[in-house]
Each structure stands twice: as structure tokens, then as C-alpha cells.
Image (cartoon, grey):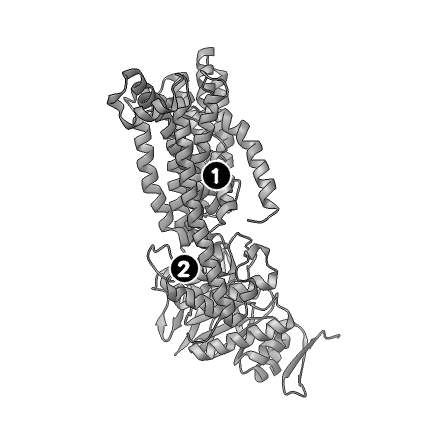
């Protein structure tokens, strides 16, 4: 094109500038995440100096065994579990919010977490294992199977009834209440020890972290994030409404089911590993939306990074409040997350991101 | 070389909407106006033609080729349907959504846009005069501005057939004329088939090469604007009287009026 297009060319310059800014934000976010994880590792019982922690990280065999055990077997699994679970919850929440066009949606709203609690309660109260030979992992295994079943119910009911966002939300909320009622029933007929166990499970705690769980979670994220990003343009189109997306050639029903399966898997794994950690899957995507808008190419990774950072910070807080005591992180995310989130929404909404 | 809808039947559940509808041949390079009362099936016809709905029977063809065998993406590339709904309020800029319309033509996972795609978006922004608000989020725009951005999405895809559902309903008088002229020029220049569903009969008469009058799921009358609008089918379809007049400038003006018996 030979014509001089000063005005529209400035629109594409704006576009490039905005993208450059968003890429910069992703890099900054990753830096913040590294910082948060480092902070998380450096805080905890044992009164270790930061230099000792760094030394143990750099050379596990070169330091005294006590130091190495604390850093590598206790702190690092917890810190990396916070990172990976935060990332899974964030990506899962972001995906849910996009396919349901509802900023309040996350896998917890749709009953995945409640179903996991039912599974865990069944294991605690009756000792029934869905997967034979689950052994000591009976609670985790049951939670996972139930969480995934909830997603499958959601999947098939929406497939049967037509995959509109409204149907999915309604079915999800029905699941949520059903599962809560079943858990209450199980609690009612459990003894005191079992009741305490159920309540603790529901709270969500990173103390259940193991290297094995961290590895599974890391692999899942490494697969899921590209899976989402490959559908980035189509997901952005979905934000313009089902009909427009279809006009643009997106197969809306199939896309929605694919993302539903992926988000459910992420949620089921994180809930079964560490219990219910509320709010992260809701807040992370909101922060991302405020920072980079709804172009899913940027929104999804930023939501993932923001959520991981938040959960890492919450993990640090859970250890710092009362040295020597690690509070269940589910309590921290809700107590600290809510005021933080509200102040964030109030301060940024007025400016318009 | 034309778009043609032949004997299409469609219904939502038991209620029939399209009842053996045929448009005849709509040649490339021509602009057709689709007029008809609310609920006569105009949008349903568009959705069937674009493949968003599967017709129970009948055939939609472009240049003689049946479109039903194409994949969703291929069909959307050939026939673009712009729905009336421009209400989405999301944090995406006008530039973003027009680029999105262009990018979704391609298969593949390239996250970044090619320079050609960006140039195509720039050209459409220029053509429709969107530049003053091209970087703003569509959620912050007026209804008319959003409608213009949506028309930008339609033009940037360079389809073979363009089905526009009331593209001027939210526009001011000047923009209506500009947009209709732009659409007609693009239709001629690119040699595409354009069908515009529209309620304003004068605007239809002024810009369209053909008018299709739709009533109860069928085409009641079709042909050149002055002949069709003079036909009794129009007043039967709308249950109004129709007075036609040439203005001093030579424009055909349509004055509908309610008949008192």
C-alpha cells in the first residue's frame, strides 16, 4: 500500500506498543513469581538464615544434613506445590471464566471442589477406596475420582442439553449443592476423629506436598498451558459471543467441551493434592484481566503467573503470622485475599485498564 | 457466478421458520437487500446460508458448488454472517477484534499476527473511518461505533459472500449512507455477493441492486427495487400501504402508511 495512512498506522503502532507492554508484564510477573517462591522457601520453622537456605539450594550434599533436609524435603516441596497448585487453579479459573463468559466462574463454583470433598469424606468415614490398592493415598485418590466424576457429569449433562454457558453454570451449581449436602450427611454420621479429619481436609493445606505431587502438577501445567494457548484466538473470539465466534469459523461447542475437560482436570488434580484452596482461581484471572485485558494469548499466561505468585505469597504469610505454626493455606487465601482483591478492584476499575 | 439458496426448509423444534425458501441467483458484484417483517426468518435464513444452522432440506451453493460439505472454518471463510448482536462488552480494542476476525481465517497456532494481516486491518480501519477510536476497548464505545467495528470484522475477512444483519440499525444518518456506500463499493470492487437485511425501505431502494421481500419463511417477491416496491406483495407483507415517489434529486423514496378501512 503506497498511500500514507497516518491515523490507522498509529492504531497498529498502538497495538504493537500494547503487546510489547504485555510481554514486559509477563516477564515482570515471572520475576515476581521467582521472588515469591524464594521468599516462601526462606520462611519457616527452623530459624535458617537466608544465606544458609541459598547454600543448601545450591549444593545439597555440601551442607549439614539437617539443613539439607529442611530445605529440600520440607520447604521446597511446599513452595513448589504452592507454585504449581496456584498455576493450575489460575489457569483453570481463567479457562472457566472465558468459556462461561462469567467472571465469577471457577471450578469451585461448578462443584468440582465440593465433589472432591465428598470423595475425601467417603474415604475418611467409611474407609472406602474407589481405586483399589490406593493404600495411604486413599483420601487423595477418592477426592480425585469424585472431582473428575463431577466434571464428567457436567460434561455429559451439558452435552445432552446443549452447551450454553447458562446450562453449564446451572448444572454446576446444582452439583455444588448436592455435594455439599452429601458431605454434611457424612459429617453428621461420623465420629469426632473423622469429623476433625474432614474439616482439616476441607481447609486445604500445602503440608500435604510431596515431590511426587509436585512433579505430576508440573507436567500437567506444561501440557495444559500450550493446549490453552493453541486455542488462544478461538477463545478470544468466544468472548465476542457464541454467534460471532461461530461466524468466525470457531466450533463453539467443541471448544467449550475441550476447555471444560482441561479445566476440570487441572482443578481435580489440585483439589485432590492439597484440598480446597478457594479464591485463587477467581482472583488470579481478575488481576490478569485488569493488567492485560482479554486477549487470551496474554490473559491465560498472566492469569497463571498471577495465581501462582499469589499462592506463593499466601504460603509465606501462612508461615510468618505465628512463627512455628503453619496455618492451613485455604484460610489465608480467603482472609487476606478478599480484602486485597476488593481494594484492587476498587482502585483499578475506576481507571479502566 | 452467484450465491443461491434453493428450497431450504428449517424450523426450531416443531415450528417451521423457512418453508421451501429460494432466493434465485444472487450474482457476484451485486448488493441485495433482504426486507421483511420481524420474525419473518431473515436471520434464520442467514444462519442457514452461513452454516451456523443445518437446514432440514434444500441447498446453499456458491458459484454452483454446494457449501454443505465444507468444514466450519472453510465455510466461514467463504460466507461471513454478521449477526445483529454487537453487545459484547469485553476488554478488547477495535483493532484487536478486527485483527481477530482476520486471524481466525487461518489454521494453525501462530500467536503473533503477520504484517499482511496488520496491513489488512489498517486498510479496513481507514476505509470505515474507525481510526479515532481504533485503540479503544469496544466495551467503552457507543452502539454505532461497535456496529462499525463489527462491519470492519466482516470486510477484513474478504469473504466471497457477505450476509449483514441490519448493519446500519444503530448508525446516524451520515454513517448509514457512508456504510452502505462502502459496502456497495466493496461488493463491486471485490466481486462478492452481499445480502443486507434492512428495515429502512428507502435505504434499501437507494443502495441495493435487488430487493428480496421475505414473508413467513418464503421470498414473496424479488427483483429490481422500483419494481418490487411497487408490487402489492410489499403492502401485503407488511400490512401497510406503500407510496413511492422520486425526489427532486432522483432518489426513490418509500413512504409506508397505515391504511384505514
For marks 2 and 1 on the same chain, the one whose residue lies earlier in the sequence: 2
The image shows residue A15, relative to residue B210, as above or below, that is above
Q: CA distance from mark 2 to mark 1?
A: 30 Å
Asked whether residue A149 appears in the rendered view, the answer is no
Relative to A104, residue A113 above or below:
above
User: Residue A124's spot in the image, x, y percent?
Assistant: 40, 18
Q: Position of residue B204 (x, y in %)?
A: 58, 76
Q: Quadrant of the N terminus of chain A?
A: bottom left
Please say if B237 is above or below A80: below
The chain to which mark 2 is attached is A
Horizontal relation, residue A133 to residue A237: left or right: left
Which element carries disc 1, helix, strand or loop? helix
Residue carrying label 1: A284
- Please tell me how many numbered marks the rendered image carries: 2
**Residue placed under numbered mark 2 in the picture:** A249
Residue A120, x across and y down, in percent: 40, 23
Query: For numbered disc 2, what is the local secondary structure?
Result: loop
Towards the viewer: A343 or B83: A343
Give whichever of B155, A207 is nearer the camera. A207
Amino acid at each position: 500500500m503506497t498511500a500514507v495512512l497516518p491515523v490507522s498506522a498509529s492504531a497498529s503502532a498502538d497495538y504493537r506498543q500494547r503487546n510489547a507492554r504485555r510481554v514486559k508484564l509477563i516477564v515482570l510477573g515471572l520475576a515476581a513469581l521467582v521472588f515469591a517462591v524464594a521468599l516462601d522457601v526462606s520462611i519457616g520453622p527452623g530459624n535458617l538464615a537466608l544465606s544458609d537456605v541459598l547454600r543448601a539450594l545450591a549444593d545439597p550434599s555440601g551442607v549439614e544434613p539437617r539443613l539439607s533436609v529442611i530445605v529440600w524435603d520440607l520447604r521446597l516441596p511446599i513452595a513448589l506445590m504452592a507454585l504449581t497448585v496456584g498455576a493450575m487453579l489460575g489457569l483453570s479459573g481463567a479457562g472457566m471464566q472465558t468459556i462461561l463468559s462469567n467472571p465469577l466462574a471457577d471450578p469451585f463454583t461448578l462443584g468440582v471442589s465440593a465433589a472432591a470433598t465428598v470423595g475425601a469424606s467417603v474415604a475418611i468415614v467409611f474407609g472406602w477406596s474407589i481405586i483399589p490398592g490406593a493404600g495411604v493415598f486413599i483420601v487423595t485418590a477418592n477426592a480425585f475420582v469424585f472431582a473428575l466424576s463431577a466434571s464428567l457429569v457436567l460434561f455429559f449433562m451439558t452435552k445432552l442439553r446443549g452447551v450454553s454457558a447458562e446450562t453449564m453454570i446451572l448444572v454446576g451449581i446444582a452439583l455444588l449443592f448436592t455435594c455439599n449436602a452429601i458431605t454434611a450427611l457424612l459429617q453428621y454420621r461420623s465420629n469426632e476423629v473423622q469429623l476433625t479429619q474432614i474439616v482439616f481436609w476441607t481447609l486445604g493445606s500445602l503440608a500435604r506436598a510431596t515431590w511426587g505431587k509436585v512433579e505430576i502438577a508440573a507436567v500437567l501445567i506444561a501440557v495444559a498451558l500450550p493446549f490453552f494457548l493453541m486455542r488462544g484466538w478461538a477463545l478470544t473470539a468466544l468472548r465476542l459471543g457464541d454467534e460471532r465466534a461461530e461466524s468466525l469459523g470457531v466450533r463453539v461447542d467443541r471448544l467449550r467441551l475441550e476447555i471444560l475437560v482441561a479445566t476440570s482436570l487441572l482443578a481435580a488434580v489440585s483439589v485432590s493434592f492439597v484440598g480446597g484452596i478457594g479464591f485463587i482461581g477467581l482472583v488470579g484471572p481478575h488481576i490478569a484481566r485488569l493488567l492485560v485485558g482479554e486477549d487470551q494469548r496474554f490473559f491465560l499466561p498472566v492469569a497463571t503467573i498471577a495465581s501462582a505468585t499469589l499462592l506463593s505469597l499466601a504460603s509465606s504469610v501462612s508461615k510468618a503470622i505465628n512463627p512455628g505454626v503453619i496455618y492451613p493455606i485455604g484460610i489465608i487465601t480467603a482472609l487476606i485475599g478478599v480484602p486485597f482483591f476488593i481494594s484492587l478492584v476498587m482502585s483499578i476499575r475506576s481507571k479502566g485498564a | 457466478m452467484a450465491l443461491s439458496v434453493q428450497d431450504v426448509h428449517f424450523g426450531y423444534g416443531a415450528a417451521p421458520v423457512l418453508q421451501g425458501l429460494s432466493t434465485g441467483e444472487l450474482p457476484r458484484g451485486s448488493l441485495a437487500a433482504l426486507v421483511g417483517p420481524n420474525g419473518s426468518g431473515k436471520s434464520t435464513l442467514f444462519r442457514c446460508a452461513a452454516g451456523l444452522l443445518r437446514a432440514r432440506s434444500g441447498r446453499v451453493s456458491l458459484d454452483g458448488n454446494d457449501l454443505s460439505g465444507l468444514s466450519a472454518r472453510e465455510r466461514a471463510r467463504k460466507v461471513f454472517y454478521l449477526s445483529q448482536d454487537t453487545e459484547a462488552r469485553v476488554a478488547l480494542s477495535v483493532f484487536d477484534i478486527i485483527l481477530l476476525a482476520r486471524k481466525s481465517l487461518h489454521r494453525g497456532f501462530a500467536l503473533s499476527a503477520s504484517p499482511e494481516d496488520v496491513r489488512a486491518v489498517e486498510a479496513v480501519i481507514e476505509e470505515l473511518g474507525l481510526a479515532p477510536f481504533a485503540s479503544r476497548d469496544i466495551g467503552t464505545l457507543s452502539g454505532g461505533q461497535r456496529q462499525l467495528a463489527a462491519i470492519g470484522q466482516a470486510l477484513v475477512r474478504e469473504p466471497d459472500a457477505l450476509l449483514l444483519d441490519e448493519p446500519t440499525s444503530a448508525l446516524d444518518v451520515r454513517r448509514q449512507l457512508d456504510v452502505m456506500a462502502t459496502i456497495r463499493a466493496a461488493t463491486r470492487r471485490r466481486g462478492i455477493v452481499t445480502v443486507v437485511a434492512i428495515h429502512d425501505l428507502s435505504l434499501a431502494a437507494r443502495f441495493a441492486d435487488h430487493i428480496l421481500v421475505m414473508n413467513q419463511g418464503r421470498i414473496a417477491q424479488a427483483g429490481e427495487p422500483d419494481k418490487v416496491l411497487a408490487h402489492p406483495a410489499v403492502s401485503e407483507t407488511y400490512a401497510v400501504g406503500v407510496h413511492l415517489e422520486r425526489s427532486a434529486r432522483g432518489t426513490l423514496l418509500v413512504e409506508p402508511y397505515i391504511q384505514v378501512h
